[in-house]
C-alpha cells in the first residue's frame, strides 16, 4: 500500500454543504494535524454512539487509534470530516479490502466504510451527505463497492444506507447486519440526492425569510443611515418576531433605538435574553464585517443579509474580501444574502418581514421576485405595485456570493404562498442546475426570467460565472426548453407577471378581440399574428358602446368555445362637448369584472388609451382569496417565523379560527385598507361588480371562477388575484404577454407527457468507449484532438451513423481513378477551409457521369479557384437529391451538452436560424427540434416540393445525442451536410472532437458553489 507522502492532499475533495435543517457545514479530508480535533470530537460522542461504531464499550481513543484515524494515503485509506466552526461534528472512513476482508490495494475494488456523528448533530442529514461525498471519493479511487457492518439496533445508520438509492445487498451475519452497496449512481440514488438537496436548500432559504428574531447591526444612534433605515422599515412592516438594534458605540445609558432594544453586540443580546438571533442584517462598512460575522457565528445566528458594498464589484482586493466573507460565514453554518444586497421581504401575515432598503413593503400577493440588482429591484417593486400585483417574497441578492436564484427556485418550488416566480438575473452561476430546477418548478408554476448583461461578454462585477462558448441565443433557447418564460426587458417581466398572477392559463392560441376602437382592434389583430397567435376577427362595439355593452360582449366571448383568451380594447367616451365623461374607467372596470365573474375561466387582458382610472380600478384587488388547490407540491400557507414550511396558516396564527381565509388576514391595516393603502375602487362594491376574488365572493363559496391547474382550467395563481384584470397601455405589450402565456401553457401540456430516449439495438457503446480510450491515449493533453476523417467515421459507425466515404483527388488522374472506384455518377468538391460547405463559391461539381466530365470539372476548379494543393479536392458518390441540413452537438462548460439543428447554407448562418435542445434529447425533443427552425417548411413540402424523410432525420439526431450523452469525452460532433431525401438520408461530411471530459458538477455529491 502507498504511504501518505506518495499522495498530495486532495483539496478538490473539500466542499461546503447545506444540511437538512438549512445550516451549512464544511467537508474536508482528515489530516495528520487533526489529532486534537479528533480526540475532542470523540469525547463529545455518547457512549451509545461509540458502542454502535465499535460494537463494544469504547470510552476513549488510544494513541494508536488517533494515529490510524488521522494518517491516510488518500487512496486505500481515506477519512473525511464534517466541520462547523472549525471543529469536527462527524467523520467517515473507508479502508480498501480484498475478497477476504483484509486490507488491500488496487485493483481490489471494495472498501469497508464506517461513520460517526456527534449526537447533537444527528438528524441533520450529516451521515447521508457524508455518504455521497465518500462514495464520490471512492469511485475516483477505483472502488466500486462499500461494505458495512451495522448493529441491528442502529436503525439510524441502517436507514442512511438503505435510503441512499444505491443498489445494495443485505444479510444478517454473526449478530450484525452486513450491507454491500454498489457505488455506481442509479436513477434512484440521483433522485434521492436531488430531493435531499431541494429540501435542504429550501429550508436554508426559509430560515432567512421567516426568522423568529432579527438584529440590525449598524443601526445608528442618530436618525439617518442605512442601518437605521432598515430598522425603520422592519417596524413599519409590522414584523411579528423580535427585533434588536446593534451598535458597538452605544453610550452607557442608551438601551433603545427607535423603540427597540439596543445592544453592543449579538453576544450581548444572547447573554441578556438567553435567546438566539436568527437573522442579522449587516449594515456596517466592509472592513468591519469580519468582526460582525464572527460575533454572529459564535452566538448561533443562522443567516446574514450583508448590505455593505466594497466587495468583488470593487476589484481584485474586494473579490478576495468577498471570498473570505463566504468562507467565514459558512464555517459557522450561516448563509449569506449579498454582499452589496438591497435586502429581503416576506409579506406572509405570520412574518411581515421587510429587512430591506425598500421604504414600503409591497402588498401581499402570490408572486416571488428575485433580482441581482437593487436599482432593478426598486423599479420592479414600483412597476408591480402600479399593476396591483402583490408579492409573497422579494430578494435582491447583490453579488449573490452565496444564496442565489437557484436556492430560491428550490424554495419557491414547494412554497404554498408563491404561484408565479419572477427573476431578474445578470448572471447564472450554475446554468445546468438552474435549468434543472427551472424545469421542475415550471411544471407546477410559471418561471419568468429577464437576463441582463447578455451581450457584454463578461459577468457583472462580483459574480462568479463559468465560462461559456455558446451564444446567448443558445442559452435562451435551452431555458425555453426547460419551460422558462424568457423576456427581454424589465417592462416585459412586469407585463407577463401581471397576467400570470391574475389570469388562468389559456387553453390555446385563439384570441377574441373586442372594443370600442376599430383601429386599436386592428393593431391588436396584427400583434397577435406577429406573435404566432390565432386572432378571431375583431369585434367593433363602436365608440357609442356603454359599459353594459362591454359586459355583454365580454361574457359572450368568454362563453364562446372558439376562443381561448380575450383582449378588450378601450378608449375614452367622448361627450357632445368633446370632453371625456367622468368615471369612465371605474364604471368600465366594474362591468368587466361582472362579465368575468359568471363566465368560463379564460384569460382577459385590457388595452386602454388614456382612459382615466381604468388601470387603477382593474389593478385593485378586492381581497386575496384562498390559495388555489393546485399551485405546487406544497400544501400549507403562511408559515410564521421559525415555523416549519409545512405549518398551516391556522397554526402560524393561533388568533384566527381554523379555516379562516388567509387572504382576509393579509396586509389589512387598522383603517381597513389593504397593505398598499388602497381600498376598493369606486363603483366596484355592488353585487354586479363583485368578482370571485372579492370578500363576499370568497365568503359565499363563489370562488369558482377559476382554480389553478392545467391550461384552460385555471390560473397558476390564486383566483383571489384574478379579481384583477391586467391592463396595458399598448396592444403589443398585452399580446406579447399573452403569447408567452400561450407558449408556456403548451409547454405544460407537453411536459405532462414527456418523451423518451429511444434504445437502438445496433449501438455499440462498449466498442465506442474502447475506441475513444485508444484515440485519446494517442493524443494526450487537456486540449483534446480533432479526429482524422477515417477515425471519425469509425466512431460514428459504432452508433449506427454512416458517413459517405470520400477519396482524395490530388490530380486529375487520381480524380478519374477515384470516380471509377466509387462508380458514376460522382461529385467533385474542394475541402479547403475557406471553401468547405460553401457551394455558392463554386467549389462543388455534381452529377459527373463519366471520366471526361470528371477531368473537365477538375480543370475548371483548378483554373478558377487555385492549385490542387490549395483546394484539396475529393471525389464522392452522388446521393439522392433532398434538403441539405446540419446536425451538431457540443459540450459547453456552463450549459452542458447541446444538440443543434439547422438547414445548410450561408443564409441560415447569417440569420441564426438554428434550433437547440439539451442532451439527452427525447423523441419529442427531436421532433420539435426540426420543426422549430424558421426554414422548417422546406422539409415538409414547401411550394409543392416533395416532403423529405423527417423520421430518418429525427433518428439521426437521437443517435448523435446518445453518442454525446454516453461518452462525455466526445466534446464536439458536426455532420455537414446531411442530405435528407424523400426516403432516407446521407451524411456527406463529419467531424468529431475528443477531449478529457469536463467535470459534471450536476452529477456529483451535493455541494455549494465555491470560488
Image (tube, rainbow, N blue to C red):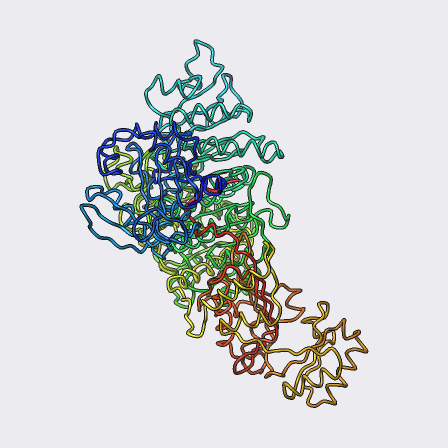
Q: Is residue 994 left or right of residue 271?
A: right
Question: Where 216 sits versus 585, above or below?
Answer: above
Residue in front for this viewpoint, 63 or 141: 63
Q: Is residue 904 visible?
A: yes
Q: Is residue 525 visible?
A: no
Q: Residue furthest left?
A: 175
Question: Where 1011 sits versus 247, above or below?
Answer: below
Residue in front for this viewpoint, 798 or 572: 798
Residue in front for this viewpoint, 253 or 883: 883
Q: Residue furthest right?
A: 863
Q: Is residue 42 left or right of residue 732?
A: left
Q: Position of residue 447 (x, y in %)?
A: 45, 51
Question: Where 310 sits versus 251, above or below?
Answer: below
Question: Where 487 sits versus 798, above or below?
Answer: above
Q: Which residue is at a point 70% across and 80% down the rendered structure image?
A: 828
User: Quarter-wise, where is residue 877 in the image?
Assistant: bottom right
Q: Position of residue 161 (x, y in %)?
A: 29, 48
Amino acid at each position: 500500500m502507498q504511504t501518505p507522502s506518495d499522495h498530495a492532499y486532495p483539496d478538490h475533495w473539500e466542499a461546503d454543504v447545506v444540511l437538512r435543517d438549512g445550516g451549512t457545514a464544511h467537508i474536508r479530508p482528515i489530516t495528520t494535524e487533526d489529532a486534537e480535533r479528533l480526540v475532542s470530537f470523540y469525547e463529545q460522542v455518547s457512549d451509545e454512539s461509540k458502542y454502535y461504531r465499535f460494537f463494544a464499550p469504547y470510552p476513549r481513543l488510544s494513541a494508536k487509534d488517533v494515529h490510524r484515524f488521522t494518517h491516510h494515503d488518500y487512496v486505500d485509506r481515506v477519512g473525511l470530516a464534517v466541520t462547523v466552526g472549525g471543529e469536527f461534528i462527524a467523520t467517515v472512513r473507508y479502508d480498501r479490502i480484498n475478497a477476504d476482508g483484509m486490507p488491500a490495494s488496487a485493483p481490489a475494488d471494495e472498501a469497508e466504510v464506517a461513520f460517526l456523528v456527534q449526537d447533537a448533530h444527528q438528524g441533520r442529514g450529516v451521515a447521508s451527505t457524508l455518504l455521497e461525498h465518500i462514495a464520490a471519493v471512492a469511485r475516483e479511487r477505483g472502488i466500486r463497492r462499500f461494505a458495512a457492518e451495522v448493529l441491528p439496533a442502529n436503525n439510524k445508520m441502517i436507514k442512511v444506507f438503505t435510503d441512499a438509492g444505491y443498489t445494495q445487498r443485505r444479510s444478517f451475519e454473526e449478530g450484525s447486519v452486513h450491507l454491500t452497496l454498489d457505488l455506481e449512481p442509479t436513477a434512484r440514488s440521483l433522485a434521492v440526492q436531488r430531493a435531499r438537496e431541494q429540501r435542504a436548500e429550501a429550508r436554508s432559504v426559509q430560515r432567512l425569510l421567516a426568522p423568529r428574531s432579527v438584529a440590525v447591526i449598524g443601526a445608528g444612534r442618530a436618525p439617518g443611515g442605512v442601518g437605521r433605515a432598515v430598522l425603520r422599515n422592519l417596524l413599519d412592516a409590522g414584523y411579528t418576531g423580535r427585533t434588536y438594534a446593534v451598535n458597538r458605540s452605544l453610550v452607557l445609558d442608551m438601551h433603545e433605538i427607535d423603540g427597540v432594544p439596543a445592544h453592543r453586540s449579538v453576544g450581548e443580546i444572547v447573554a441578556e435574553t438567553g435567546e438566539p438571533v436568527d437573522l442579522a442584517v449587516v449594515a456596517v462598512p466592509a472592513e468591519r464585517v469580519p468582526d460582525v460575522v464572527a460575533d454572529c457565528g459564535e452566538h448561533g445566528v443562522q443567516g446574514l443579509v450583508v448590505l455593505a458594498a466594497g466587495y468583488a464589484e470593487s476589484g481584485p482586493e474586494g473579490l478576495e474580501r468577498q471570498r473570505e466573507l463566504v468562507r467565514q460565514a459558512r464555517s459557522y453554518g450561516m448563509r449569506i444574502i449579498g454582499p452589496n444586497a438591497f435586502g429581503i421581504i416576506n409579506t406572509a401575515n405570520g412574518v411581515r418581514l421587510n429587512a430591506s432598503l425598500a421604504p414600503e413593503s409591497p402588498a401581499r400577493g402570490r408572486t416571488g421576485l428575485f433580482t441581482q440588482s437593487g436599482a432593478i429591484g426598486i423599479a420592479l417593486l414600483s412597476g408591480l405595485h402600479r399593476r396591483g400585483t402583490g408579492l409573497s417574497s422579494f430578494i435582491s441578492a447583490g453579488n449573490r456570493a452565496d444564496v442565489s436564484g437557484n436556492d430560491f427556485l428550490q424554495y419557491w418550488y414547494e412554497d404554498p404562498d408563491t404561484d408565479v416566480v419572477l427573476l431578474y438575473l445578470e448572471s447564472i452561476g450554475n446554468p445546468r442546475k438552474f435549468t434543472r430546477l427551472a424545469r421542475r418548478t415550471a411544471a407546477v408554476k410559471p418561471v419568468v426570467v429577464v437576463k441582463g448583461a447578455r451581450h457584454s461578454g463578461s459577468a457583472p462585477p462580483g459574480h462568479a460565472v463559468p465560462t461559456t462558448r455558446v451564444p446567448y441565443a443558445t442559452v435562451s433557447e435551452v431555458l425555453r426548453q426547460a419551460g422558462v418564460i424568457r423576456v427581454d426587458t424589465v417592462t416585459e417581466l412586469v407585463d407577463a407577471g401581471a397576467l400570470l398572477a391574475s389570469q388562468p392559463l389559456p387553453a390555446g392560441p385563439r384570441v377574441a378581440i373586442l372594443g370600442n376602437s376599430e383601429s386599436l382592434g386592428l393593431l391588436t389583430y396584427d400583434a397577435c399574428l406577429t406573435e404566432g397567435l390565432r386572432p378571431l376577427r375583431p369585434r367593433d362595439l363602436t365608440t357609442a358602446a356603454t359599459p353594459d355593452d362591454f359586459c355583454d360582449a365580454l361574457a359572450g366571448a368568454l362563453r364562446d368555445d372558439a376562443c381561448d383568451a380575450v383582449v378588450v380594447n378601450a378608449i375614452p367616451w367622448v361627450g357632445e362637448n368633446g370632453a371625456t365623461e367622468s368615471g369612465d374607467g371605474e364604471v368600465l372596470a366594474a362591468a368587466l369584472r361582472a362579465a368575468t365573474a359568471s363566465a368560463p375561466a379564460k384569460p382577459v387582458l385590457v388595452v386602454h388609451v388614456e382612459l382615466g382610472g381604468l388601470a387603477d380600478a382593474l389593478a385593485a384587488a378586492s381581497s386575496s382569496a384562498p390559495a388555489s388547490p393546485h399551485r405546487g407540491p406544497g400544501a400549507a400557507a403562511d408559515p410564521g417565523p421559525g415555523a416549519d414550511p409545512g405549518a398551516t396558516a391556522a397554526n402560524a396564527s393561533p388568533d384566527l379560527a381554523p379555516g379562516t381565509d388567509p387572504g382576509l388576514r393579509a396586509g389589512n391595516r387598522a383603517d381597513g385598507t389593504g397593505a398598499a393603502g388602497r381600498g376598493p375602487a369606486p363603483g366596484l362594491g355592488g353585487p354586479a361588480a363583485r368578482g370571485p376574488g372579492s370578500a363576499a365572493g370568497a365568503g359565499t363559496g363563489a370562488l369558482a371562477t377559476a382554480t389553478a391547474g392545467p391550461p384552460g382550467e385555471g390560473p397558476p395563481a390564486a383566483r383571489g388575484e384574478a379579481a384583477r384584470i391586467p391592463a396595458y397601455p399598448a396592444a403589443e405589450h398585452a399580446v406579447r404577454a399573452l403569447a408567452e402565456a400561450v407558449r408556456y401553457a403548451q409547454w405544460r401540456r407537453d411536459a405532462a407527457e414527456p418523451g423518451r430516449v429511444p434504445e437502438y439495438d445496433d449501438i455499440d457503446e462498449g466498442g465506442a468507449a474502447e475506441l475513444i480510450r485508444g484515440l485519446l491515449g494517442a493524443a494526450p493533453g487537456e486540449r483534446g484532438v480533432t479526429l482524422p476523417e477515417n477515425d471519425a467515421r469509425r466512431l460514428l459507425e459504432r452508433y449506427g451513423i454512416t458517413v459517405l466515404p470520400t477519396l482524395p483527388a490530388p490530380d486529375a488522374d487520381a480524380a478519374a481513378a477515384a470516380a471509377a472506384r466509387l462508380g458514376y455518377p460522382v461529385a467533385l468538391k474542394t475541402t479547403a477551409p475557406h471553401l468547405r460547405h460553401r457551394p455558392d463559391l463554386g467549389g462543388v461539381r455534381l452529377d459527373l457521369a463519366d471520366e471526361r466530365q470528371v477531368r473537365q470539372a477538375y480543370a475548371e476548379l483548378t483554373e478558377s479557384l487555385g492549385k490542387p494543393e490549395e483546394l484539396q479536392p475529393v471525389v464522392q458518390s452522388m446521393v439522392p437529391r433532398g434538403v441539405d441540413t446540419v446536425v451538431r452537438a457540443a459540450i459547453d462548460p456552463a450549459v452542458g451538452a447541446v444538440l443543434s439543428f439547422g438547414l445548410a447554407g450561408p443564409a441560415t448562418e447569417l440569420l441564426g436560424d438554428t434550433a437547440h435542445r439539451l442532451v439527452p434529447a427525447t423523441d419529442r425533443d427531436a421532433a420539435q427540434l426540426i420543426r422549430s427552425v424558421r426554414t422548417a417548411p422546406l422539409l415538409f413540402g414547401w411550394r409543392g416540393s416533395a416532403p423529405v424523410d423527417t423520421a430518418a432525420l429525427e433518428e439521426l439526431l437521437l443517435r448523435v445525442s446518445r453518442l454525446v450523452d454516453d461518452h462525455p469525452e466526445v466534446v464536439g460532433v458536426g455532420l455537414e451536410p446531411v442530405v435528407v431525401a424523400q426516403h432516407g438520408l446521407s451524411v456527406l461530411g463529419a467531424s468529431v472532437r475528443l477531449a478529457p471530459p469536463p467535470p459534471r458538477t450536476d452529477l456529483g455529491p451535493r455541494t455549494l458553489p465555491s470560488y
